[in-house]
Amino acid sequence: MASIHHTTMTPTKLELLTGWLPKQSWYVGDAGAPELVKAGGFRLDDPEGAVGIEFMVVVDAAAQDPVAYLVPMGYRGAALEGVPGEALIGTSEHGVLGTRWIYDGVHDPVVRGQLRALLRGEAMPQHQNRSDTPDPTVTVHETGPGDGFEVQVNRVLRPAETAQASSGCLVAGWTWPNGTAARGVFAAVAPR
């Protein structure tokens, strides 16, 4: 299982996302800089131990009505070849691991593979801030074995009634800036 290092990152993930997020086609904020706060998420383990995998929820509190965004990220010790330029969120100096290349997880093959494994019931969600700690708040309505599906990541999160979640959904929570808890569908599968 992955170890969480409680150390510095320069720039921080939120600083990198503040510059990257407004450039994305799915960003719904205005032209100003977002005011991002970390609001939730979870981690997955890379079976090879080379890539850090985090599904982070950030809330843009600058908007009149705050907006929650899901940003899956892959943390790597070297640049990832063969991905579009917009896939790189940025680089950061990690206090223990050195330079980290941080990629948008929808473009990272290890992140995508572990998300698919999670939806098949073959991976366990991990707590976002504690090493070797499963996160029971992440609910997976498994698709079953096989790879005959595509995964759609919900970038803009909306609170939803999740008791009726269908097969192939990943449901998790976040906290709004006012302290209110919310849950919604982070990802869902669709047949190929």
Image (spheres, grey):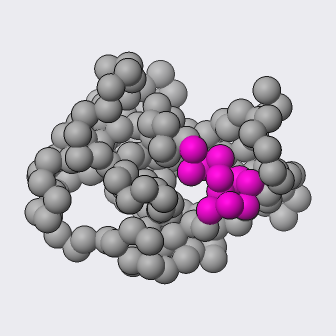
> What secondary structure is the magenta-colored segment mainly?
helix
Q: Position of residue 110 (x, y in %)?
A: 48, 44
Q: Quadrant of the C terminus?
A: top right
Left or right of residue 45, residue 90 in this image? left
Q: Quadrant of the N terminus?
A: bottom left
Left or right of residue 183, residue 63 in this image? left
87 above or below 53?
A: above
In the rendered image, which quarter is residue 113 located in?
top right
Left or right of residue 28, residue 152 in this image? right
Q: Position of residue 159 (x, y in %)?
A: 67, 54
Instruction: Residue at 23%, 40% (x, y): give it.
Output: 78
In the rendered image, which quarter is residue 21 located in?
top left
Instruction: Residue at 32%, 20% (x, y): give it.
Output: 85
Instruction: Residue at 32%, 71% (x, y): give it.
Output: 4
Please say whether residue 61 is visible from this viewpoint.
no
161 above or below 137?
A: above
Please say whether residue 128 is visible from this viewpoint.
yes
Reply yes or no: does residue 117 show up in magenta: yes
Q: Which residues are magenta?
A: 113-123
Is 32 or 127 nearer to us in this picture? 127
Is 55 or 146 nearer to us in this picture? 146
Reply yes or no: does residue 111 show up in magenta: no
Instruction: Residue at 25%, 71% (x, y): give it.
Output: 5
Q: Position of residue 186 (x, y in %)?
A: 63, 50
